[in-house]
Amino acid sequence: MTAKGGHGFSQADWDKAKTEARDAMIARAKKRGMITYSDLVDQMQSIKLGAHDPRLSILLDEISTEEDANGRGMLTVLVVHKVGDMEPGKGFYELAQALGRTFSDPQEFWIDELHRVHAEWS
């Protein structure tokens, strides 16, 4: 049995991985920190994904959509590139727009959302 959407994992393992990822992000949010994509996947034990695996984007989108629907903001705002801009990938901003967020300055939006999530959990 594979997870909905054909992610290649059982639904139970996919759900466990989402919980592991969510818990890792919340732990960082409580410390007002961030986490890199590679550090996040290292903390997921139920399934193995690489930092650049397209399925990671699906998992992060599901988490952020659920968290945002519960009024806690886009939790995946904490997941950032290890090198370079140290910001979330473009999928984060695309999801934000899909969730109805409007912004002209992506970096300003990211910082505002980061502060919102930190305030929620710290």
Image: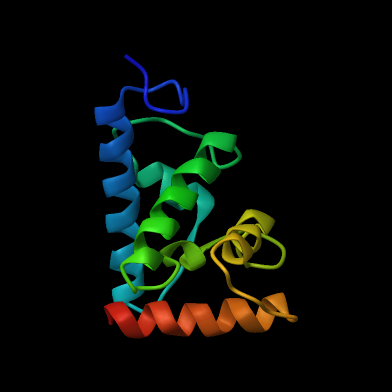
Indicate whether 41 appears above or below 95.
above
Asked if residue 116 lies left or right of residue 18, the reply is: right
The residue shown at (31%, 67%) is 70
Q: Residue 48 placed where, x, y %?
A: 41, 30
The residue shown at (41%, 72%) is 73
Asked if residue 29 lies left or right of residue 16, the reply is: right
Q: Quadrant of residue 102?
A: bottom right
Would residue 21 be visible to someone looking at this image?
Answer: yes
Q: Which of the colour schemes (rainbow, by chain, secondary structure, one colour) is used?
A: rainbow
Determine the residue located farthest toward the top in the rendered image.
1
Q: Residue 49 placed where, x, y %?
A: 47, 33
The residue shown at (61%, 40%) is 52
Q: Quadrant of residue 101?
A: bottom right
Indicate whether 48 appears above or below 27.
above
The residue shown at (45%, 67%) is 74
The quadrant the C terminus occupies is: bottom left
